[in-house]
Every structure is written in C-alpha cells, then in structure tokens.
Amino acid sequence: MRKTVGVGSLRKVHGGRKNRGSAPSHHVDASGSVDRKIMQSLEKIGVLEQDEEKGGRRITQSGQRDLDRIARTTIEEDEDDE
C-alpha cells in the first residue's frame, strides 16, 4: 500500500474506459464522492489521518495494528477451513 493517498489518485485507480461510440475509448477518472466519503469515515474512526506535509491521507498506527489483526485472524480462519 502507498504511504499517502488522496482522493484524486483513488479516482484514477477506480476509473475505467469511456465508450465513445465509433471513436477509440479513453480512460476517465471515477467519481470522487464515494472514495472521499469512505476516507472521511475512516478518518472519523481513527484509521486514517490527514498528511499535512504531502497532502492526502495516511494510515495511523492504530489503524495499521487493526488491519494487521484482521489479516491475521482471516489467515488463521482460512487455515482452519483446510
């Protein structure tokens, strides 16, 4: 995962191809509304924080700890299923 991520970079990642009829297709960025609201919600619960130096948002220490714990339990459950 990248250190800092802004809404603009997520729009590029989630964008797709625009069908322009008989003209060749071109990439278009996705709407930023959903990405922005998700990032704001994660910021409210303390998973993300604003990066004042570079702009965008980055994951907090407690957020990284929570994600690591969730990943570990997921792997353990997957191993138990096999």
Image (spheres, rainbow, N blue to C red):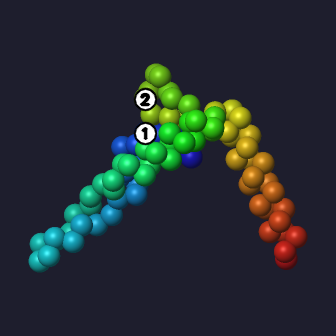
In the rendered image, residue 55, in percent from the top left (x then y), is placed at 43, 29
Residues at marks 2 and 1 touching, judged by CB atoms closer than 8 Å? yes
Horizontal relation, residue 49 to residue 80: left or right = left
N-terminal of the two: label 2 or label 1? 1
Task: Name the residue: 44% across, 49% down.
Answer: 35
Secondary structure beneath label 2: loop
Residue type marked 1: Gly
User: Which residue is tagged 2?
Assistant: 55
Task: Name the residue: 74% across, 40% down.
Answer: 65
User: Which residue is tagged 1?
Assistant: 6
Any part of residue 61 in sight: yes
Residue type marked 2: Gly
Q: Is residue 73 above or below residue 52?
A: below
In the rendered image, residue 75, in percent from the top left (x then y), is placed at 79, 62
Quadrant the C terminus occupies: bottom right
Any part of residue 9 in sight: no
Q: Residues within 10 Å of mark 1 (few under 14, many from 20)?
A: some
Q: Is residue 26 above or below residue 41?
A: below
Q: How many marks?
A: 2
